[in-house]
Amino acid sequence: MVEKPQSESESKLYLNHTNVGVINGTLSVNHIGNTTETLRDNNTVYLQGFRNLTADNDMGSASYTFQAIGNYDSYNNYKSRGVAIFDEVATGELSFLANTVAVYKTSVDADGNGAFLMWHWR
């Protein structure tokens, strides 16, 4: 379930994430990292953090930092838009991500069902 911070005393949240994903429709990756989520006015949050991607069977890795702006609506749905900056150390199947930028969007409904879509900017 998606829930926004409930009070000013919860104005900053620190989150750890572990997810799985698919790149280019075929490459399975593990997505591990952390996020700092800062509550702003009008149900808006500022997000910043770090992610490490590892391709299945140790076929490569890549890391990025990100910043985003997210919004919670009155139905507890959540959407964010952001930018990811990949560092120079990317290996194997993920080496194409070294020193690149991507834009992305995330949406999660009140039941916790979500999608994360990222576009590699070349």
Image: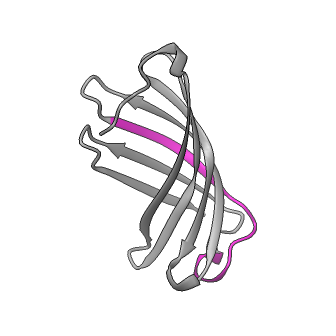
Q: Quadrant of the N terminus?
A: top left
Residue 45, percent from left and from top: 50, 28
Where does the magenta region start and end?
A: 78-95
For residue 69, above or below residue 27: above
Residue 53 is one of the magenta-drawn residues: no
Residue 83 is one of the magenta-drawn residues: yes
Residue 51, percent from left and from top: 60, 56
Seen at 62% across and 45% down, the residue is 49
Residue 3, percent from left and from top: 35, 31
Residue 54, percent from left and from top: 57, 72
Seen at 61% across and 79% down, the residue is 60
Q: How is the image coloured?
A: one colour
Q: Is residue 85 left or right of residue 119?
A: right
For residue 64, above or below residue 89: above
Seen at 69% across and 68% down, the residue is 98
For residue 36, above or below residue 85: above
**Furthest residue in direction right, as rendered:** 88
